Amino acid sequence: MTSTTESPVRLAMPDTPGQPAPSPELARLYRDFESELLVPLWTEIGDLMPASPKPAAAAHVWRWARLLEIARRSGDLVPVGRGGERRAIALANPGLGGAPYATPTLWAAIQYLNPREDAPVHRHTQHAFRFVVEGEGVWTVVDGDAVAMRRGDLLLTPGWRFHGHHNQSDTPMAWLDGLDIPFVHAMGSAFFELGPDAVENRATPDRSYAERLWAYPGLRPVSQPGPTPSSPITAYRWEHTDAALSAQLELEAEGQPGVVAPGHAAIRFSNPTTGGDVLPTVRAEMHRLRAGAATTVRREVGSSVWQVFDGAGRVSLGDREWRVERGDLVAVPSWVPCSFTADTDLDLFRFSDTPIFEGLHAHRVQEGQA
């Protein structure tokens, strides 16, 4: 078979040690590779099998103040409804060629809902969460269960659950959306289905049905047997997260163990039916640094996105450093050394693709050195 269109495979004549000497016969061989859509390993091994990960994604910081201003303008100009589905503005990593991906596996976006506005109901196989940096007044309705969204809350929408949002307040609200869209897209496994145009459950309960059933420390309803792939808890409330982080630092002050490093408290949101991550493809954590404290320099296989929940500090990514403050978002590519230093008390939300790599037995971590 000979290709009648331009081949997507592009081969350069080798000019590095260990490669065959150029010749007319070799040039013809390479043309035959191209015509048959073949690529010899010996010309690609340096890119395919590097000594350590060389991600295409770049370390980058997006400023929340700027994102919020652009989202507000979008709220004035862009309606929410069928076709667009969501007024969500995705972070596009500068190393990924314009794709709307924060990292090769993670989607991060600011979503914005105007007063008294609905985002229509749909479902998809991608797993999603919402993290609220500021505001309240919106309820997300997941399979009919109305869940209040408030500052500091982590809210889950596992894959293939119908969900929509409705703003019952007189003020707009913005939040962070996180999904595994890039991973699902790359795997060719995405499904999507429309639901009602309007959110049918207009209730505004303080606590959702799932919270009333599941959200008690160490307790599990006997009526709900078996593990579930995603956490059944629809909302992890800030008052609990805040109390857990504060307790770790109090224990440290008393000389008791509990923190991950001096002045650094951290918790991981977990699935109560398995003890594992809240979503099959996403790990979510909250970190608190006392002013002057720093995280241990860490690099790991897989990527992550951090958002400053409160306070100000600096983030070092490889040989670059940025100052960050409330709401700012940070993309950390695979195997890039990362550390945060707190100029004030600093709270940080983090989500990562670690469950994917742990499931593939491909996760690797290095701490304490760049």
Image (spheres, rainbow, N blue to C red):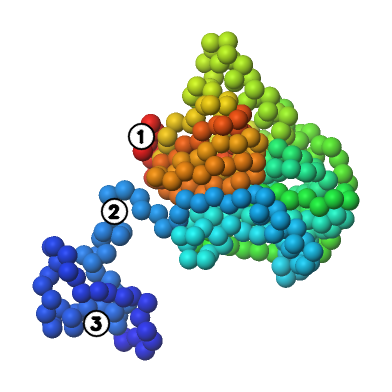
Q: Name the residue under label 2.
A: 50
Residue depicted at x 49% and y 60%: 94
Q: What element carries label 2?
A: loop
Who is closer to the viewer here, 362 or 81? Answer: 81
* Residue 192 picture location, percent across and down: 66, 64
**Which amino acid lies under the numbered mark 3 shown in the image of this protein?**
Arg
Comes first in the chain, label 1 or label 2: 2
Contact between labelled residues 2 and 1, with CB atoms less than 8 Å apart:
no
Q: Position of residue 2 (x, y in %)?
A: 31, 87
Question: Where in the figure is residue 246, as x and y percent of width and height?
Answer: 64, 22
Q: How far apart are marks 3 and 1 (CA)?
A: 45 Å
Q: Do the residues labelled 3 and 1 touch (CB within 8 Å)?
A: no
- Quarter that holds the N terminus: bottom left
Q: Nearer the viewer, residue 69 or 97?
A: 69
Task: Name the quadrant containing residue 151.
Answer: top right
Residue 254 image label: none
Question: Which image quadrant for residue 44?
Answer: bottom left
Q: Quickly name the residue at label 3.
A: 31
- In this picture, residue 222 sits left or right of residue 5: right
How crowded pointer 1 is (Cα within 10 Å; few <14, some 14-19, many 20+) is rated as few
| 252 w.r.t. 316: above or below | above
Residue appearing at x 80%, y 40% in the figure: 208
How many angstroms separate mark 1 from mark 2 (CA)?
20 Å
Q: Please, what is the three-letter code of the amino acid marked with disc 1?
A: Gln
- Would you name the residue on which mark 1 appears? 369
Q: Residue at x 62, y 63 (%)?
A: 191
Looking at the rendered structure, the secondary structure element under dot 1 is: loop
Q: Position of residue 349 (x, y in %)?
A: 60, 39
